[in-house]
């Protein structure tokens, strides 16, 4: 096979305008979902802060050929292509299958890996060795994949589609699934001693690097770099280290060479997982202690997003309540329509629309600001109804008395009515903030790493749902506890004021 050195493509130039999402002229930003994505892109269980994987190594090899430094951007699976269209990064590398549907939505390089789907069952199971044999049984796979389409064609009623591989293999172990149909690299790395692959390979799955439809320049440059990696043997060496070089890859690339390359990454991963599973209580304790900084960072993000969103919700909610109660007909109608629309649609849809939809109208917000705005606008509708109830609880004579004292309508609201109404709704408002803290977990879909996303990352890295779950749950309790106390104090103080005859 001909060998091409990296210097032969050293003159390859990528127009800066084509590299969307770059922070500097020498960056090559690319995205993947590294939360539970072994062996593609994932957090190394031996050093949790370190990102690794065979796709990660491929991107680090492509970067120098384009005179750029590859920068990994974390995004959830569902948000990868929307984030590409939004210009958050230049490309997506996440085992994206080159199906006709995907090709209609994005541009692809040539494949960097070709494989098949495989059936995985518990070790004592027999008979599940063909696609037809799965009919009538509960079968799991990853959603939006070729395997899912095969199963839908075969027997839609028996399909369970997952977002995380760890959840799927856990359900197979626990007997919730009869079998799994999944890409062979995933099957290879997630197999445990009580599972096995069965039957022959099914179909062909090809992964390509995805780009926005309007960005062929960067696609062509990366495609040329990828061809170089194939021709000079770099791709072979990377895949061999991960024990992923197969006869199918040799046939696809034309590289039938047999260099002596030890599967060091595969061996290291297996050793690490064996150590984690066999470690005693002290090893588990030290591992949990090492999670504290990451959980602390997630807690700070949760507090920041929630606190700023609540400030927005309180201010806007008060304006909506005043508009609906005291405004002119048009203002009352607009305020009521806003409240009903926001309360009648899911918060998750609102977050996705603000982050991915608004750029179509020229409004582009950072993930942090989009999370604050989405939560604030959503909770403003609920706060508005609380405040409106508070306004209705203020006796009508209070407004009439203020006007009789020669106050303007606005002064009467600001100095007499609103303070009394606000005092009435303080307990409810503090309880709403506790709810907002928990709902802030939804901002993880727009690349913000708060507490819930931290839990997903730790549990999927270590296949441990109990310890990280208890720690993250405790963090939520510690954050919310002061506000629980505040709500209790407000209720007692308000009750005392009411008993004394004050409103």
Image (cartoon, rainbow, N blue to C red):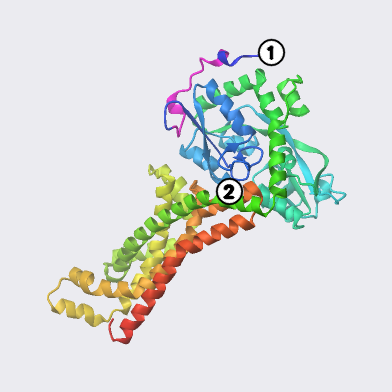
Q: Quick check: 339 left or right of 445?
A: left
- Label 2 element class: helix
Of pointers 1 and 2, the one earlier in the residue sequence: 1
16 within the magenta span: yes
Indicate which disc residue 418 carries: none
382 within the magenta span: no
Is residue 162 visible in the rendered image? The answer is: no
Residue 32, position as x, y percentages in the image:
57, 39
Q: Residues within 10 Å of mark 1 (few under 14, many from 20)?
A: few
Image quadrant of residue 404? bottom left
Q: Quick check: 358 left or right of 279?
A: left
Q: Badge 2 is on which residue?
A: 457
Residue 84, position as x, y percentages in the image:
51, 38
Q: Residue at x 34, y 78 (%)?
A: 493
Is residue 156 visible in the rendered image? The answer is: yes
- Label 1 element class: loop
* Nearer to me, 485 or 9: 485
Residue 446, position as x, y percentages in the image:
49, 47
Residue extending farthest to the front is 282
**Magenta segment, which residues?**
8-22
Q: CA distance from mark 1 to mark 2?
A: 42 Å
Image quadrant of residue 62? top right
Q: Residue at x 32, y 68 (%)?
A: 321
Q: Is residue 72 above or below residue 398?
A: above
State the predominant SS element of the stretch in magenta.
loop
Q: Badge 1 is on which residue?
A: 2
Q: Is residue 344 above or below residue 122?
A: below
Residue 65, position as x, y percentages in the image:
54, 21
């Amino acid at each position: 096979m001909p060998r091409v050195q990296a210097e032969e493509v050293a003159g390859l130039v990528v127009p800066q305008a084509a590299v969307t999402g770059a922070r500097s002229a020498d960056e090559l930003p690319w995205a993947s979902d590294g939360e539970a994505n072994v062996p593609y892109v994932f957090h190394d269980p031996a050093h949790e802060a370190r990102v690794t994987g065979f796709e990660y190594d491929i991107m680090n090899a492509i970067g120098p050929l384009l005179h750029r430094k590859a920068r990994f951007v974390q995004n959830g699976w569902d948000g990868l292509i929307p984030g590409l269209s939004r210009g958050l990064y230049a490309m997506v590398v996440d085992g994206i299958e080159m199906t006709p549907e995907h090709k209609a939505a994005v541009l692809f390089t040539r494949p960097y890996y070709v494989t098949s789907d495989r059936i995985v069952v518990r070790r004592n199971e027999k008979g599940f060795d063909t696609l037809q044999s799965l009919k009538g049984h509960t079968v799991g796979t990853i959603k939006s994949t070729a395997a899912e389409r095969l199963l839908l064609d075969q027997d839609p009623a028996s399909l369970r589609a997952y977002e995380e591989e760890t959840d799927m293999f856990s359900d197979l172990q626990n007997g919730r699934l009869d079998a799994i149909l999944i890409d062979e690299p995933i099957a290879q790395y997630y197999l445990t001693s009580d599972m096995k692959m069965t039957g022959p390979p099914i179909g062909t799955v090809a992964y390509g690097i995805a780009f926005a439809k309007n960005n062929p320049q960067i696609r062509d440059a990366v495609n040329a770099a990828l061809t170089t990696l194939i021709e000079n043997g770099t791709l072979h060496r990377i895949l061999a280290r991960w024990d992923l070089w197969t006869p199918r890859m040799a046939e696809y690339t034309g590289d039938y060479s047999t260099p002596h390359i030890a599967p060091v990454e595969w061996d290291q991963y297996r050793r690490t997982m064996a150590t984690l599973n066999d470690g005693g209580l002290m090893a588990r304790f030290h591992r949990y202690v090492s999670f504290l900084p990451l959980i602390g960072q997630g807690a700070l993000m949760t507090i920041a997003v929630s606190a700023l969103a609540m400030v927005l919700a309180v201010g806007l909610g008060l304006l909506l309540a005043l508009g609906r109660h005291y405004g002119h007909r048009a203002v009352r109608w607009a305020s009521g329509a806003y409240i009903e629309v926001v309360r009648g649609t899911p918060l998750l849809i609102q977050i996705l629309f603000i982050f991915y939809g608004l750029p179509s109208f020229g409004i582009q917000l950072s993930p942090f600001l989009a999370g604050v705005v989405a939560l604030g606008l959503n909770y403003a509708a609920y706060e508005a109804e609380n405040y409106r109830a508070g306004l209705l609880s203020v006796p009508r004579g209070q407004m009439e008395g203020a006007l009789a004292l020669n106050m303007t309508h606005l002064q009467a609201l600001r100095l007499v009515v609103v303070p009394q109404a606000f005092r009435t709704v303080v307990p409810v408002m503090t309880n709403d903030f506790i709810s907002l803290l928990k709902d802030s977990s939804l901002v993880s879909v727009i690349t913000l790493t708060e507490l819930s996303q931290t839990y997903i990352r730790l549990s999927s890295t270590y296949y441990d749902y109990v310890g990280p779950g208890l720690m993250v749950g405790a963090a939520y309790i510690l954050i919310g506890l002061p506000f629980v106390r505040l709500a209790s104090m407000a209720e007692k103080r308000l009750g005392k004021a009411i008993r004394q005859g004050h409103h």
